């Protein structure tokens, strides 16, 4: 399991990279807009910090514009992964840009047929949105597991990137169903190593040790 940070904030990324747990970053137009910066500038800044995949999303529904944006993003850095929406237009763009070796993360995936289509056309990552599926009464984690199983059956090499993570339980459950990657908001990432029994146990061990040396 690889952990990506779902953010475009440099301070957030810099302060978590030293954990050794950050394998990549996902961005989207909303996250970039919150930062009030130029997309290319921010992506290249992130790539100076993180030696791993950084997803950059197209901002159009026009096929040719989508392809042109994808090729531009691809030219920025070897670790740029172009995010395309899993729409009919996005699927056509995927087919075209994979001819040129562009690394692609297909996003907004909500059905098994979408996931299979993405893999069939050579997507590098496919991003099912766990939280948004949970919001409509579906089981987002089960869906991730279904994709993992289907890819295994058919021999697809596309990696499953669990997105729309709302809790540590979402991360743990994604691990249980063998997702390849989780992209995690900062507030959830900071809770990954926390457990009340760990805190309690460590406090007890230290207290016992101090008591023994002061006896």
Image (cartoon, helix red, strand yellow):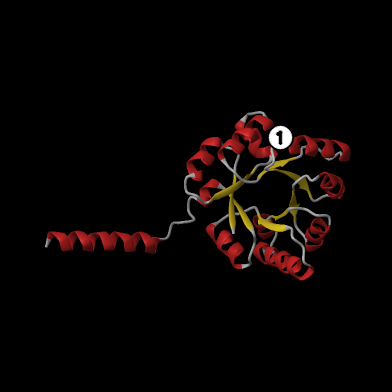
Q: Nearer the viewer, residue 31 or 3?
A: 3
Q: Nearer the viewer, residue 34 or 52?
A: 52
In this view, the residue farthest toward the left is 215
Of helix, strand and loop, which one carries label 1? helix
In the picture, the quarter occupied by the C terminus is bottom left
Counting labels gives 1
Q: Is 41 situated left or right of 101 in this image?
A: left
Q: What residue does disc 1 label?
A: 76
Q: Is 213 situated left or right of 173 in this image?
A: left
Splitting the image into 4 quarters, where does residue 130 fall?
Answer: bottom right
Q: Position of residue 43 (x, y in %)?
A: 65, 35
Q: Residues within 10 Å of mark 1 (few under 14, many from 20)?
A: few
Q: Is 175 situated left or right of 160 in this image?
A: left
Q: Position of residue 117 (x, y in %)?
A: 83, 58
Splitting the image into 4 quarters, where does residue 7 fall?
Answer: top right
Q: Identify the residue at image location x=65%, y=64%.
A: 141
Q: Identify the residue at image location x=76%, y=71%.
A: 153
Q: Nearer the viewer, residue 87 or 40?
A: 40
In the displayed structure, 199 sits above or below 68; it is below
Q: Nearer the viewer, residue 126 or 129?
A: 126
């Amino acid at each position: 399991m690889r952990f990506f940070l779902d953010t475009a904030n440099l301070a957030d990324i810099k302060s978590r990279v030293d954990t050794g747990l950050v394998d990549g970053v996902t961005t989207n137009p909303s996250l970039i807009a919150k930062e009030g910066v130029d997309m290319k500038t921010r992506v290249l800044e992130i790539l100076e910090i993180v030696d791993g995949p950084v997803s950059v999303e197209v901002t159009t529904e026009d096929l040719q514009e989508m392809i042109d944006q994808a090729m531009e993003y691809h030219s920025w850095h070897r670790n740029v992964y172009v995010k395309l929406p899993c729409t009919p237009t996005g699927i056509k763009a995927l087919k075209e840009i994979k001819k040129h070796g562009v690394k692609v993360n297909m996003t907004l995936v909500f059905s098994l047929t979408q996931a299979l289509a993405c893999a069939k056309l050579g997507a590098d990552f496919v991003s099912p949105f766990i939280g948004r599926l949970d919001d409509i009464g579906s089981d987002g984690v089960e869906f991730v597991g279904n994709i993992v199983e289907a890819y295994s059956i058919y021999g697809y090499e596309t990696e499953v990137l669990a997105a729309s993570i709302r809790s540590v339980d979402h991360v743990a459950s994604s691990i249980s169903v063998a997702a390849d990657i989780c992209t995690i908001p900062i507030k959830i990432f900071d809770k990954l190593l926390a457990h009340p029994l760990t805190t309690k146990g460590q406090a007890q061990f230290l207290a016992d040790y101090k008591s023994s040396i002061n006896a």
